[in-house]
Amino acid sequence: MTGNGRFGIHGGQYIPETLMNAVIELEEAYNRYKDDPVFNQELTELFNDYAGRPSRLYYAKRMTEDLGGAKIYFKREDLNHTGAHKINNVLGQALLAKKMGKTRLIAETGAGQHGVATATAAALFGMECVVFMGEEDTKRQALNVYRMKLLGADVVPVTTGTATLKDAVSQAMREWTARISDTHYCLGSVMGPHPFPTIVRDFQAVISKEIKEQMRQAEGKLPDAVIACVGGGSNAIGSFYHFINDLEVKLIGCEAAGRGIDTFETAATINTGRLGIFHGMKSYFCQDKYGQIAPVYSISAGLDYPGIGPEHAYLHDIGRAEYVAVTDEEAVNAFEYVARMEGIIVAIESAHALAYAMNYSKVLSADQCVVVTVSGRGDKDCASVARYRGEEIGE
Ligand SMILES: *Cc1c(COP(=O)(O)O)cnc(C)c1O
């Protein structure tokens, strides 16, 4: 990384002047606490006692034998409290906000997963919580709206633009500008203006730190590849981070191709997007021919963000990580296959990574190993996968 929140040409702080004070205050606080032993001790206790870390590294034996290639390991972020990796980031940011004297957390959410995680942390810390959610999404994700309210949060429907995730992010940024004194904006992925991509990365990096230790225990060596799905990119960067300097470890991010990267119904940013500036950062974005942010689509609500975090854009530029596109069809097939082979119902987001890993591991030999991050559990996706297969089961 180069200075001031740049990753090569990406990242930076493309924000209105009114937001500068907030991000400067946040950066200063983060620099003060990130290496503070007391802060890190408290965070480790929250990770372990509350979130249930370390998450397991599981050898998927039946799948490995069936596919006949490299050994496949799952990094089980689905076993964390609230069912995904998002809690790692949220606990870190909530603790930081508390140290900064903030009493109120705001957040954006698309499918509702980050909103639920933030509402969870707010309840734990006794903080006020407001979650901005596109009105369209509040209808599609009624159960998560109920969960957030049960946890004590206010859910504010956002009606601007396409009334989905990108509009919720914009609204949360506006709200933060209007009320900086007592409020922390708990951003949900490795995106937005500096210092968010770095802060969120550091809190999620616990994933690769654990993978490294667990692989040494299990195999006495590093994995040959680490594979993770990419929406904004937080579980993927968390899975990659401690391997970036281990050049023999291949890093593979799996984007949502939706109905295909040759269609308009896709969310594969690296594969179809162009350089741009949005939500406070320079990175790659899905855009129309006028440079406007394009509507994106994926069966997976957690992956249909029209951009990608700046550090991924940089890892792509320098060729350190590879970004592949996986369709709805491939992800649904993997979702069903992993359920039958391993008895694990994974998030449809994670199924994108597993789908790629299934093909990739086949071309490797039996003495090689791949680690796939299972970013979350798939209970939330059963109804939409059933619908994809032409079955209505209700929710
Ligand atoms: C939110 C979410 C994602 C996508 O977010 P990233 O920041 O790209 O990790 C992936 N998987 C699950 C289970 C999620 O909830």
Image (cartoon, rainbow, N blue to C red):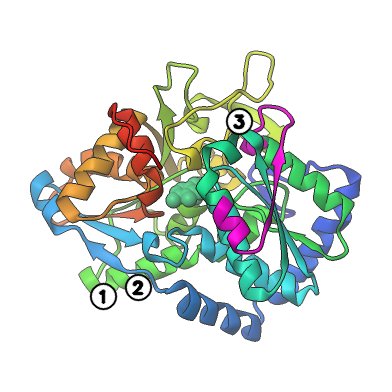
Alpha carbons under labels 2 and 3: distance apart: 35 Å
Front residue of 276 and 351: 351
User: Going 58% across and 47% down the picture, which residue do you hit?
Assistant: 311
Residue bearing mark 1: 217
- On the picture, is 62 further left or further right than 45? left
58 lies left or right of 26: left
The three-letter code of the residue at mark 1 reads Gln
Q: What residue did someone put label 3 on?
A: 285
Q: What is the CA distance from the residue labelled 1 to the residue labelled 2?
A: 6 Å
Circle 2 residue: 213
Residue at the image point whose x is 29% and y is 30% from the top: 391
Select label 2 or label 3 by which is in front. Answer: 3
Total labels: the figure holds: 3
* Residue 277, image x, y percentages: 71, 33
| Label 2: how many Cα within 10 Å (few below 14, some 14–19, many 20+) | some
Are circles 1 and 2 on residues that touch, CB within 8 Å?
yes
> Picture coordinates of residue 177 (x, y %)?
86, 50
Q: Residue at x 65, y 36 (%)?
A: 135
Question: Is residue 265 visible to us here?
Answer: yes
Q: In this orientation, does residue 366 appear?
A: no
In what element is the residue under mark 2? Answer: helix
- Between 220 and 62, the one nearer to me in the picture: 62
> What span is in magenta?
146-166
Q: Secondary structure at mark 1?
A: helix
Q: What number is the disc on residue 387?
A: none
Number of the front mark, 1 or 3: 3
Q: Is residue 148 magenta?
A: yes
